[in-house]
Structure formats: structure tokens, C-alpha cells
Image (cartoon, rainbow, N blue to C red):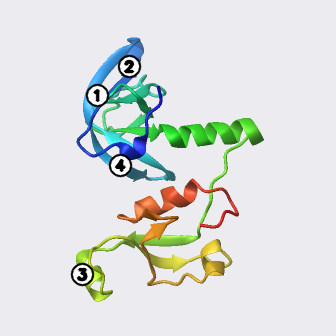
Amino acid sequence: RLGNPKQLEVGDPVMAVGAPFGFEQTATQGIVSAKGRSLPGDSVVPFIQTDAAVNPGNSGGPLFDGSGAVVGINAQIYSQSGGYQGLAFAIPIDVALKVKDQIVATGKASHGRLGVTVQDVNQSLAESFGMKRPDGALVASVARNSAAAKAGLKPGDVITEVNGEPIVRSGSLSSLIGMASPGDKV
């Protein structure tokens, strides 16, 4: 049964199943450590970060929520030794299904691109902009001839939501835009 990764909260229990080091049907338990995590070189996927013990061989296995629904696909770990060090990342199941549908329909996956570089809004920036909370993505630069430039975005603008979905940290902007298809209006 498929679950809804958007309903996951930091601290919720999760279970990862896979075949670490060839030991099939291994289950490990942990909690959701973070949501919407952007990793270097892959800003489109809003990874679910967990502390469930995931090792080489777990990739491709399911990540279950506390009710037993699949909410993600174990994708990678952060490790300096090659083994588990407390940082595992799963692709949210809704993202994986969207990519699967694109590949089946067109033979490839494509993602929207806004054409901005952004940074988090900290408390002092929020105060200087007259914002109540330090949420959003502060536009640092806009690529020439990009969708952002055509829409009139400028450095210094703060993006606070995309299609009604709030932007709390700047990293969630690229994930939300990346889930749109090229040419979509958001």
C-alpha cells in the first residue's frame, strides 16, 4: 500500500527494508530526521532523511511509515566509511511514481527549471524585509532568458510559496519547481 510522504513529520517512525551486504529482507527502524532535503548535485528530489540503518544493498528498497505504507524508496547514504553513519535518504514515493510515469510515457524524465539561485531567509533578513517569520527563498540571482527572468523575478525578491505550497527553506523551492514539467505555469 502506498502512503503520502507529505503527511510524514520529523520524528515519525519509519522502517527501511532491503538487502544490505546481500542479507535479503533486512528491516531496520528509525525516525524521519528531515524532509525536503536537497543533496549536492540533485536539487530536484526533496529527499526524506532518516536515521534508519541503511547500508550498501538497501538502495531500491521501500521506506515504510508507522502504518506500514510505502512512503519512499531508499536511495543513498551519507558516509565517509561506505557503511551506515546515521544519514540515509529516500526518494518520496510520489516523486518516484511521477518519474516512472514520465519514463513510461516519453522514455525520459524532465523537470521544470526556474533559473534562479536562492538562499535561506534568516531572522535578520526577515526583519529587514518586514516579514513575520524567516521563511521563503531569497532570490540571489536570476539567469538571463530564464523562466524567472520572463516572469519578472529580480534579485532581492523572496519567494514564499509555489502553487499554494509554502516555502519554508530555500531548498524546497527547487524541489517544488522540479516536480513541474517544463513550460508549466506555477
**Residue at the far right in the pictured view:** 106
Residue depth check, mark 3 versus mark 2: number of the one nearer the observer: 3
Q: For mark 3, give the secondary structure.
A: helix
The span from disc 2 to disc 4 (Cα, nearest Å) is 24 Å
The residue type indicated by label 3 comes to Ser
Categorize mark 3 by other alpha carbons within 10 Å: few (<14), some (14-19), many (20+): few
Does residue 58 lie above or below 183 as drawn? above
Of callouts 4 and 1, which one flags the residue occurring earlier in the amino acid sequence? 4
Query: In the rendered structure, are the residues bearing label 2 and label 1 in contact, judged by CB atoms less than 8 Å apart?
Result: yes
- Please give the residue where the numbered disc 4 appears in the rendered image: 35
> Is residue 85 visible to us here?
no
The span from disc 2 to disc 1 (Cα, nearest Å) is 10 Å
Q: Residue 158: where, in percent of width, then height?
A: 42, 78
| Residue at 30% over, 30% down | 66
Query: In the rendered structure, are the residues bearing label 4 and label 1 in contact, judged by CB atoms less than 8 Å apart?
Result: no
| Residue at 42% over, 13% down | 22
Q: Quadrant of residue 70?
A: top left
Say whether residue 141 is left or right of residue 87: right
| Mark drawn on residue 182 | none
- Please give the residue where the numbered disc 1 appears in the rendered image: 53
Of callouts 3 and 2, which one flags the residue occurring earlier in the amino acid sequence? 2
Residue 144 vs residue 148, the one in the foreground: 148
The residue type indicated by label 2 comes to Pro
| Residue at 39% over, 51% down | 36
Q: For mark 2, give the secondary structure.
A: helix
Say whether residue 63 is left or right of residue 11: right
Q: Residue 172: where, in percent of width, then height?
A: 43, 59
- Please give the residue where the numbered disc 3 appears in the rendered image: 124
Q: Residue 20: where, in percent of width, then height?
A: 38, 19
Does residue 180 lie above or below 77 as drawn? below
| Residue at 43% over, 22% down | 57
The residue type indicated by label 4 comes to Lys
